[in-house]
Image (spheres, rainbow, N blue to C red):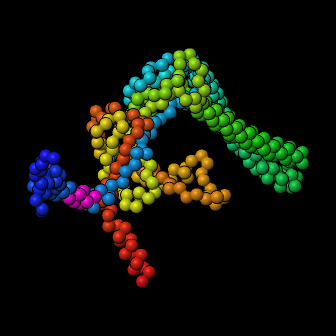
Amino acid sequence: MTEETTARPEAGEPAPAEEAKTSPLKRKGVRRALLIGGIVILILLGLWFVRYWTVGRYLESTDDAYVQADAVVVSPKIGGYVEEIMVAENQQVEAGDPLFRIDARDYRSRVAQAQAQIDMAEANAAGLRAQIAEQRAAVDRATAQLASARSELKLARDEVRRYTPLAESGAESRQTLATRQTDLERAEAAVAAARAELDSARRRVASLEAQVGQARAQAEGGEAQREAANVDLGSTTVQASISGRIGNKTVQLGQFVQPGTRTMSIVPTQQLYVTANFKETQLGLMRVGQPVTLEVDAFSGVEIEGRVESFAPGTGAQFSLLPPENATGNFTKIVQRVPVRISIDATPEILARLVPGMSVEVTVNTRSAAGSLDQMTEARGEGAD
């Protein structure tokens, strides 16, 4: 048997394989890299915590937000056939620009008819005024006749008064006295007739003046009808009430439109705003005037500034077609959302590309109201004491 000499490690010395399996953590470079990495992570965590504590915890965000505008629906005031359309889909218009025109022949005839009624009433009034002038002359004539009759009556009375004692004394005959009394009665009758004629002439003047007033009222009624007809005539040209862009245009040439028919919409693209539906749990520190950051899905990476403008007077569920009635049936609590209106402060280039309906992610910085909840809590505690 051949002897083989095998080198064995002495007791207490590591084997070569064990030296190869030494942990990397014992290497100086690795330990230094891990230490630096740990310090960097701690610094980043500290910065994140500081930012969260000072800013982040006051940021309230939602992606349930959309660009909106108070669009105006264009509807004609009168009915008729459309004879001309002056705008096209998506065209920019200014307030007062004509949009389309309705056939105006019927409305012109109504204006002419009202004018004819006015002319007729004014002609009647002129004729009545001429009759009044004639009747005033008749009043003057009746006045003169009454004055003459009164003079005759006075003379007849004097004659009767003078002949009465003469007849009683026999100086004059009874027949002469009777004749004078008859003349007195005739004079009294003539005075009564003249007075009646004067009253009749005056009443005729008053009647004619009333007829003049009636004719004038008819003329004023015609003027009112003419004004209404002119308004309808002017309404045959439908104009833009606001500045904006034409959208949802449905009117066609030759179409018969009824009053109130929806023909197109005008979207005020320079007066856009955002409606963000925040959860009710996010509104505790939200106030009007707080700064807002807007990120429109269509403009990736572009941040737009804004301001909280107002809050809705109720949750969205309250203004739905069928508001919920939680007092009936089984109840499941659901976090409600409140519409918040946000103004947009963007450049004209961005505003020109924004359209209602675009999706927006909204972030509101509520830091300005950070102390309000603490004040409310303190006030509640003082009230409890």
Query: Who is closer to the viewer here, 261 or 285?
Result: 285
Q: Is residue 48 magenta?
A: yes
Magenta part of the chain: 42-52
Asked where in the image residue 226 lies, by quadrant, the reply is top right
Q: Residue at x 39, y 71 (%)?
A: 376
Q: Position of residue 39 (x, y in %)?
A: 16, 58
Q: Is residue 368 magenta?
A: no
Q: Residue at x 39, y 75 (%)?
A: 379
Q: Residue at x 28, y 58 (%)?
A: 52
Query: Residue reaching furthest bottom?
Result: 385
Asked where in the image residue 25 lies, by quadrant, the reply is bottom left
Determine whether 72 is above or below 252 in the image: below
Q: Position of residue 160 (x, y in %)?
A: 81, 50
Q: Residue at x 40, y 48 (%)?
A: 62
The answer to whether 258 appears left or right of 311 in the picture is right
Query: Who is closer to the viewer here, 298 or 68?
Result: 298
